[in-house]
Amino acid sequence: MTRAWQGENWQLVEPEQSTATGEVEIGVLWGRGTLDERVEHAGSLVLALEALALELGRPGAVRAEVKIGSDVCGLSLRGELEGVRAAWAGLPDLFTSTLDTTGLTPGHVSELPWLEDVLLRTGPSGAALQLFRFETEGTQDAARRLLRELDPRRGDVPCVFWTDQESLVGAAFAVGPLRGAGLGRRWAEGTPRWRRDPEAWPQGGNRASVVPIPERGHEVLSMMVPRTADGIVAAELVRSCLVRTLDRTLDGTLALERSEPVDVTSRMTGMGEGLHVVLSFRTFLAPERRPDLFTALLQDLDDLPGSAVEEAIADSISSARCEREQRVHGLSPAMEPTAQGVHEALVAAQRSLHICLDPALLSLREHARLSALPVVGPVEEDPSAPAETYRGSMRSAMLGNGDTSTRARLSLTTLHVSGSGMVNDVSPRAELPDTATVDLTRVIAVWDQPPGAVWLLAHTGELIRVSSSALVGRKAFTRDLDAALHGVPRVTQRGWSHRRDFSGLPGALFGCLLVLSPGLLFFGFVGVMIHHQNSGPAWIERSPSWTETVELTNGTDITVHQPVPATSPSSAGGEGEFIVDVTVCGGIDSLGKTPAGETAEREVQNTVQSSDYALRGEGGTELTPVITEEQPPVLLEPKECTSLELHYRGELGDQPALVYTNAVGDEVSWS
């Protein structure tokens, strides 16, 4: 996509192919995201921007859209030129007016890939609470303060503007230098940020380590790469290298008892100077297979041929959105990737690898490099620390709310709980562990759920439920636990009363302990909340970049990779056959209305079929689908993932786009 900068703060871009005729778009991007929010202010960023969007969209002549990212956020307007111009002209006054956020609740923010790893690298922040729809008493006040800080004229938070209409460049905010403090050296709660400077490595949670295998999800490793074209190419090289290593070492299978084909997906999240890259498998990789696989991967990365680097560079593209994100963080302007830059980014990736392994399976002789890595292990009790042990009460056992084998061992720094528990039917996992140890000095937030229950959001991202009503001496236990958690933010969950009784929910939660991996609780409640809010639109319109994951309104995630040639383009007209890889992870049932005002069919957004996708070449001409084999539609369950390999023939050109549409009205165009 062609784009040009005027001054340091305005970007002129070409109109998106999906933009309706006669419509224009204008927006602003700030260098602040959910990782910059303190826990006690969780939700204030999205709340502030939603208040702005509500005011700007009141006349109905324009559509206002809010985007919240890990370290950036944005607001854009789309509509007829004069309507957009008039609405945008009113934006400066909104920052200094008293916008009423009372009654507004922060909307859902897309889940960060592999929250446990994000927390390890960045520490606690508002991002952890957003996943569970938690907010604090300070959210509303923080949102009102933040509105003033976001005023571009103040320069407190760096921002850049963009538009696809030349006459709007400089509207309301003059063309000029980039203003703002730029990148800090630490995240919200003081954790050092990853830095590109090699002398700054290793950096705490960003150093290469062996980390626990996730109990939910299929993540296998993560890494940090520079937020540059070189870094993006390096991330793709690691992904493709892992695919080749799998093919060679595992004969194309992923698990001891399965024979699914290799499918490695990648997701990138901005983290200041770097990109957090998570690689996942579509199916679970057995722990016994991992040591040999990752030993081979490290060697293959060392032996990566120069031709592979050059080929990856040739296939790379940049995007206007990436340029905006780089500039708003004060990073160097986007440049074409180079072999030297990619090699340096690969070094950064290997120095920051988090590899999911069971360290007990490592052999010092056969897995020497992996054995030398530090291990991020579970929290352990200090046996020498004074502690009180509380046992399950007979009365609770007779009432079916626990059993006498339940134990809770509480010290000044840790809580170890064990006992039986049940989880409601919406959980993707049938079984949950019956024991957990929590580092009370690192608890992110506390959610009180009377009568006699409390949820602890641990530093690992786990949400742990402890029921004091199941214990003998529950008053003393509650008093001591409250003392140990003094100063930890208390939260409520949006859409639920602070005193809500859960006994009326399907599959009510009982027992002393539940350990939920990130995301499980969210899916447990979202169906009830949306049930009362399903009169809104079920569809979205988006124009993301390649490999950017888009979340539909029902929670379905779609990731599309850039087309790659299956055959060499012919010399006449540049025609050829191209392959596009698509990964889809299911959400809940579709809710809301279609553009025609009809109720959305509940299975549409969770149905995966190749006919919903079209590859367009330069000028919007659609390429012809090539059917290699019949792929019947697949209906996904929540969090279930699958992939498509789409084949097309035709002339691709320099500005291709993969467009997804469905019967609900969604239209997403990756380019």
Image: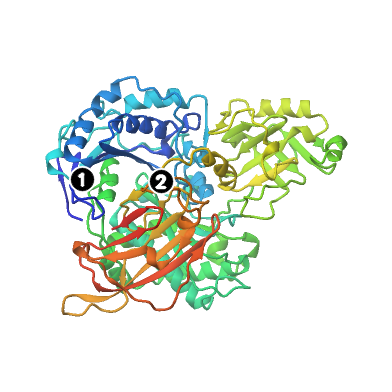
Question: Counting residues from the N terminus, which is met first, the one under dot 1 or under dot 2?
Answer: 1
User: Which residue, as the protein is rendered here, is positioned at the far left?
Assistant: 167
Label of residue 195 in the image:
none
Dot 2 corresponds to which residue? 194
Viewer-side residue, 372 vs 77? 77
Q: Position of residue 662 (x, y in %)?
A: 39, 58
Frontmost residue, 660 versus 106: 660
Residue drawn 60% across the image and 73% down it: 258
Q: Which residue shows up at 38% across the image and 77% down it? A: 627
In this orientation, does residue 660 appear?
Answer: yes
Q: Is residue 158 above or below residue 315?
A: above
Q: How many marks?
A: 2
Quarter-wise, where is residue 218 in the image? bottom right
Q: Are marks 1 and 2 in contact (CB under 8 Å)?
A: no
**Residue tagged by mark 1?**
23
Which residue occupies the foreground of this view, 108 or 456?
108
Q: Callout 1: helix, strand or loop?
A: strand
Q: Is residue 16 left or right of residue 133?
A: left
Q: Quadrant of the N terminus?
A: bottom left
Give above or below for 612 relative to 407: below
Badge 2 amino acid: Trp
Residue 518 in the image: x percent, y percent? 56, 47
Give the farthest residue toward the top.
Answer: 98
Quadrant, the C terminus: bottom left
Q: Left of 399 or right of it: where is 135?
A: left
Can residue 353 be seen by looking at this rendering? Answer: no
Q: Residues within 10 Å of mark 1 (few under 14, many from 20)?
A: some
Crowding at mark 2 (Cα within 10 Å: few <14, some 14-19, many 20+) = many
